[in-house]
Image (spheres, rainbow, N blue to C red):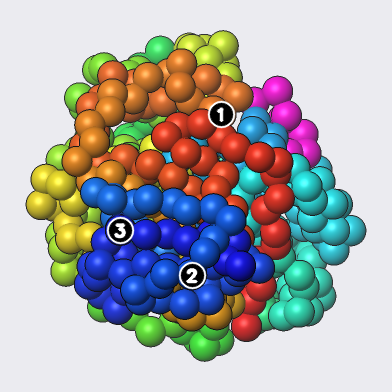
Amino acid sequence: MLDLLIKNGQCYIDGELKNVDVSIKDGKILDIGQISEKANNLFDANGLTVLPGCIDTQTHFREPGSTDTEDLNSGSRAAVAGGITSVFEMPNTNPPTSSKKEFKRKLDLAKNRMYCNYAFYFGATADNSHELADLKNLEGCCGIKLFAGSSTGNLLVANEKDIETVFQNSSKVVAVHSEDEEILNINKKLIKKGDVHTHPIWRSEECAISSTRRIVKIAERYNKKAHVLHVTTKQEVDFLSQHKGNITFEITPQHLTLYAPDCYDKLGTYAQMNPPIRDKSHYDRLWYAIKNNFNDTIGSDHAPHLKINKEKEYPNSPSGMPGVQTLLPVMLNHVNHGKLSLKQLINLVCENPIKIFGIKNKGYIKKRYDADFTIVDMNKEIKIQNKNIESKCGWSPFDGFIFKGFPAATIINGKIKMLNGKILGNPEGLPLNFN
C-alpha cells in the first residue's frame, strides 16, 4: 500500500504543468501518472499546483547564541509554514560554526528539532584554511560562508590575502557576503544618528561592487566556485552577468519588492539590512537580472531580530529581517503580476540550487527522488500579518501586504508537515546529501 497519493493537481514536471498523480512510498516518489493504487493518505490537490520542494539557500536561525530571537526549531516552523522544504543555515552564530567540532554540534542541535530538511554553511575565518580544505564529505555541509565585510556576528575575513587563502583552500562553493570592509570603515563618518536613510550611503554601492570585483577576480584565479549573496546594485548585476560559469549570484525577495526612500519612510529601521535596500534604479536592474535569467537563486536572507532591538535608534539598531516564511508568497505574487514566470521561479528556488551546490535527489518531481513538495494555490489572496509569523521575532517587513499565490501544503520526506497554515506532526527533517 502507498504511504501517500497526490491526486488531481497540476504538477510541475520538465518545465510544464501536467495533470498527473504522484505516488509516494518510504519517503520517495514511487510513480507519476494516472494512479489507482490504494494509499494510507490521499491528498486531493484539485485546483492546486504541485511544485518540487522549494529550497531557501540563505537563512540565519541564530542557534547557538541568540535563541531568544530564533532557534533551529522555530526557524524551521517558519520555513514549513511558508512552503519551504529545505534550508541552508548560516554560521555567524555564537560561537560561530567555523570548526568541525562546532559543525557537529549544529547537526546534533538540528536532529529531531527541525521540521524542514537542512544543511549548514561552514564559516571561513582568517586561520581555518586547513579545515576548509577538507569539507567534501562532511555530512550536511552545503558550502563555505565568507564575510568580506562585517555584518551580524564576528566572522570577518577582510584582508585580501586571507580571502585568497580561503578560496585557495576551499573544497566547496564559497558563498560571500560581499561588502568592502575598508570602504565601510571610511564611510562611517556619513552615518547620521537617528536617520536610517543614511544606511545605503554608509554601505554604498561602491562598497558592494568593489568587494564583488575582488571576489570574482580571486575565484577565477584559483578556478573556484563563488556564490555572491544578496546582490543589491546595478553595477554588480552588469558585472556578474559578464562572469558566469563558476560565479553565481542571489537576489532576495525584499530587494525585489521594496526600494528607497519609500521603505525607510514607512518601515524605519525595520527596513535596515546588509547590504541595504537601495533606490528604484537598483531595484529595476535587479528585475532586469531576473527577467534575463542572469541571477541564479532567490534566498530570503532570513535574519530575525527582536522588535525591542530593531526599534533602537539608528545605527544602534541591528540589520536584518525575517523572510523564510514570506519568500514564496512574495515571489508567487510577482509571478501572478507577470514579473517572472513560474518556470523562472522554479529555476531559482529548486533547480539552480541543486546544480550550484550539488544536492542529491531534490528539486524535481521525478521517480525515485525524495518526496518533497510545495503545493500552492495560485489564486489565493492572503494579507501578511505579524500575528501569523512563526519566527520568534514575531514580525515581518511585509505586515499588511496582500499577496496573491500562497502555499497550501508542505510535504517533506513524504509526510504532510503543513496544511492550510497549520504545522503538523513532529520535527523529522533530515540533513541534505551532496554529490
Please check the rendered image and state whether residue 65 is part of the magenta-colored stretch, yes or no: yes
- Region of the chain picked out in magenta, as a range: 62-69
Front-lying residue, 13 or 171: 13
Q: Which image quarter holds the C terminus?
A: bottom right
Residue plotted at (37% across, 50% down): 44
Of marks 2 and 1, the one in the foreground: 2
Of marks 2 and 3, the one in the foreground: 2
Q: Is residue 14 above or below residue 145?
A: below
Residue located beneath label 3 in the image:
8
Could you tell me residue 328's position as x and y percent? 35, 46
Amino acid found under the numbered disc labelled 1: Ser
Q: CA separation, marks 2 and 3?
A: 14 Å
Residue plotted at (41% across, 25% down): 396
Residue located beneath label 1 in the image:
391
Of marks 3 and 1, the one in the foreground: 3
Q: Is residue 7 left or right of residue 152?
A: left
SS under mark 1? loop
User: Around disc 3, counting alpha carbons within 10 Å, would you say few (fewer than 14), some (14 to 19), or many (20 or more)?
Assistant: many
Q: Is residue 433 above or below residue 236?
A: below
Q: Are marks 2 and 3 in contact (CB under 8 Å)?
A: no
Amino acid found under the numbered disc labelled 2: Glu
Could you tell me residue 23's position as x and y percent? 48, 68
Q: Earlier in the sequence, mark 2 or mark 1?
A: 2
User: Around disc 2, counting alpha carbons within 10 Å, would you say few (fewer than 14), some (14 to 19), or many (20 or more)?
Assistant: few
Q: CA separation, marks 2 and 1?
A: 39 Å
SS under mark 2? loop
Residue located beneath label 2 in the image:
37
